[in-house]
Image (tube, coloured by chain):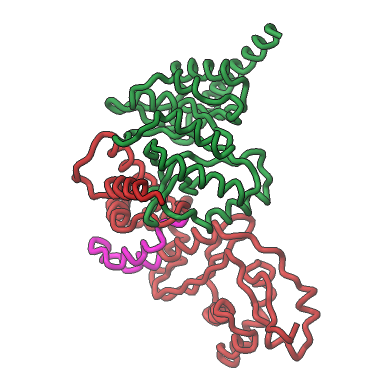
Amino acid sequence: MGLSLGSADPLDERHLARLECLARRFEPALVSEHLSWSSVGARHANDLLPLPYTEEALDHVVERIERVQERLGRRILVENVSSYLEFAHSTLPEWEFVSEAARRSGCGLVLDVNNVWVNSVNHGFDARRYIAAIDPQAVGEIHLAGFERAGDLLIDTHGARVSAEVWALYRAALERIGARPTLIEWDTELPALDVLLDEARIARSHLASLERASAEMA
Amino acid sequence: MSACLRATQLELLEAILAAPGVVSSAGLEVYRRNVGASLASALAAAYPVVRRLVGESFFEEAAARYARANPSASGDLHDYGESLAAFLEVYEPARGLACLPDVARLEWACHQSHHAADAGPFDAAALRDVAADALGEVRFTLHPATHLMRSFHPIAAIWEANQPHRDGTPERLEGPDHVVVRRADGRVRVERVDPAEWTLLAAFAAGASFEAASAALAPGDAERVLAASLARLVRDAVICGFTLPAGNA
């Protein structure tokens, strides 16, 4: 968090040094950051802001991912973010931007299925087409979460149950990509523990039925 | 490089941080609310005693005004809010509560203490190895989680009285406080200390040698504080190490 990977500012060397120190100390299996920006001109929004999906932004973010990977001495994963506005001068669909960023930099992806759904409603695209464009080999982890509706927009709040549409899209993603470690993000308006356990149970049952299906095919 | 990208980002961030009422869209409002909510909750988390002293709605309004004038300058929200005390000093509606800025400073010290790095244990064996005639040159190092505060107001008593399990009535209503903030077993502690002990620690914090720090105390005080405090300050990890100038090692 907080690296502001897509920012036009120079990479925050202090933040990067702290991240490097953290990764060295705890040797996590995966290190990831969002495919977005959160600061420019040394002012921070502390929020995940969308990039314009242009060749210029793609070149920039690929170079930044490469720098971070070199510095940490490991492949990182980048995660697609939810967004509430689009840039009129974007020239690429989001899924192409995300796939190309991974392909060119060699990084992996955290595929946030809820963010795909939220953006498909907010910006009017076909969520399944997005999933279909993602290279299965690149995906190292899947995220799920709940959203809230505010007028015409869906807002990624991490404060509700995963919706039926997102479970269906998760299922489609698993069928295309294969089983992946799945994280349900719920960090506001925390519910009772049994609600969380039930969400985890649903995710597990999707993963298990996928494994059964692939065993039968084999 | 990225000339257009930079312009796009500057424009969007400017629009998000703009004052309410400036032309907006539903999407922009989502980001404005997110940013406002993150900063407000960062301030509320760092300043629970200030919040309790002034009440929730007063705090919310003050925090919103502070946030508009002070955008975040770090990707880590734990860094946000350092200058709230300075803001409160000139915040007209808070004029009636003279102690408020110093209470805010104390809370910021607690916040920093909570998030400070760990330090290894004090190397007592290494101190024993220092030659007797070089002891005066020893420079003690304060633990990264140790902070010193002093105020003309009884800030330690006010802080203590406004912890969640307390009813808000301070044990002392006036008089200055010399305070050491330290961390023990992962918990931040606020302790009122003897002014002479505080002066000694402040000298250590400024990098003074043991000899110079002792000389900063009144003659009788020096021996009394050194005898009573030093072992405890090391045991409580207020002091976590020492250095010697090159040539004395």
Q: Give the magenta range.
A: B79-103
Which residue does the image show at 48% across and 64% down from the upper left?
Answer: B109
For residue B179, above or below residue A106: below
Depth check: give the residue in front, A185 or B229: A185
Question: In the drawing, does residue B245 fall left or right of residue A13?
Answer: right
Q: Which residue lies furthest to the bottom in this view?
A: B219
In terms of depth relative to the viewer, which is nearer, A24 or B2? Answer: B2
Q: Residue lying farthest top? A: A216
The reply to whether the magenta stretch includes residue B83 is: yes
Residue A201 location (% of width, % of height)? 59, 20
For residue A215, side relative to residue A130 (left or right): right
A212 is higher (above) or lower (below) than A77: above
Q: Residue at x 37, y 56 (%)?
A: A41
Q: Nearer the viewer, residue B239 or B144?
A: B144
Quadrant containing the C terminus of chain B is bottom right
Q: Position of residue B15 (x, y in %)?
A: 27, 46
State whether residue B22 is above or below residue B240.
above
Colour for chain A in the figure: green
Q: In this view, does A106 lie above or below B205?
A: above
Residue A66, located in which quarter of the rendered image?
top right
Q: Is residue B91 visible?
A: yes
How many circles with numbers are drawn on the protein? 0
Asked whether residue A48 is in view, the answer is no
Q: Where is residue B33 in the image (x, y as percent from the top left)?
A: 32, 41
Tell me which residue sits at (36%, 61%) in the image: B84
Residue B87 in the magenta stretch? The answer is yes
Please give the letter of the chain rendered in red: B
